[in-house]
Amino acid sequence: GAGVSQSPSNKVTEKGKDVELRCDPISGHTALYWYRQSLGQGLEFLIYFQGNSAPDKSGLPSDRFSAERTGGSVSTLTIQRTQQEDSAVYLCASSARDTIYFGEGSWLTVV
Amino acid sequence: ILNVEQSPQSLHVQEGDSTNFTCSFPSSNFYALHWYRWETAKSPEALFVMTLNGDEKKKGRISATLNTKEGYSYLYIKGSQPEDSATYLCAVNAGGTSYGKLTFGQGTILTVHP
């Protein structure tokens, strides 16, 4: 497709389980970002990949969160031992220049 | 830590009204400002990216201005329509090693009543 694609769209998981969220960026975009928005909060930066450089992980809230980007394209955000406070919409975005394009998000609910 | 503030938090207007919102940010260490429109169940849509002091951008009935010296940007909507109802987000990045890190404001929720 032409835009940033994320899966799953919605995920309900039990507290303590691991989840994986997938992002397919726009083809040719070298930069990939993960953000999240929790209820009542603004969009919060998580991690940024740029080409082959080391990712900027400064926004990851705890060591239960990790992300990888394989082959400079698809990215997976993994949350281990999920907690209720992890419930949020997780947005992936990509860019080639200054404009950053977002996907529709993965809505995660931890029960 | 970059602090981006948007006002008002929410706004109700009648169809045909013109409206504007504000985004404030620290004027030091600024690289670019982004405006997005985010409708429920959709992806945030990029409206403008602005980098230069005094810059003005326009897209149809929507326009934006930027003042990097005093640290604010205005977004204007002329002749609001119900389909303009959305959350309008402002985000700033500081460039350099923080280039990829957008700091978002809390957004302005606009509701346009027919």
Image: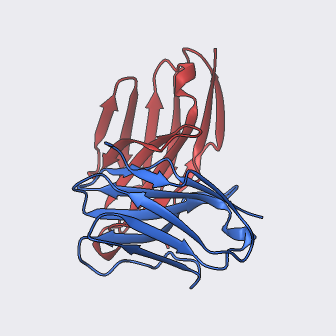
Chain colours: A blue, B red
- Image spot of residue B91 (x, y percent): 45, 55
Where does the N terminus of chain A fall, quadrant-wise? top left
Residue A9 at x, y percent in the picture:
56, 50
Res. B26 visible in picture = no
Which residue is more in the foreground, B85 or B50? B85
Q: Residue furthest bottom?
A: A63
Residue B72, relative to residue A38: is it above or below? Answer: above
How far across and down, in percent of the image, does residue A44 sit? 54, 64
On the image, which quarter does residue B63 sit in? top left
**Between residues A49 and B101, which one lies in front from this camera angle?**
A49
Residue lying at 30% horizontally and 38% vertically, measured from the top left: B56
Name the image quarter holding residue A67: bottom left
Residue that appears at 40% across and 23% down: B61
> Toward which corner of the image does residue A84 lie, by quadrant?
bottom right
**Residue A12 appears anywhere in the view:** yes
Asked whether, in this view, residue A103 is left or right of residue A86, the answer is left
> Where residue A100 sits in the image (x, y, percent)?
35, 52
Compared with B87, B98 (above or below) is: below
Vertical comparison of A52 with B91: above or below? below
Identify the residue at the far right of this view: A111
User: How many badges with numbers are in the image?
Assistant: 0
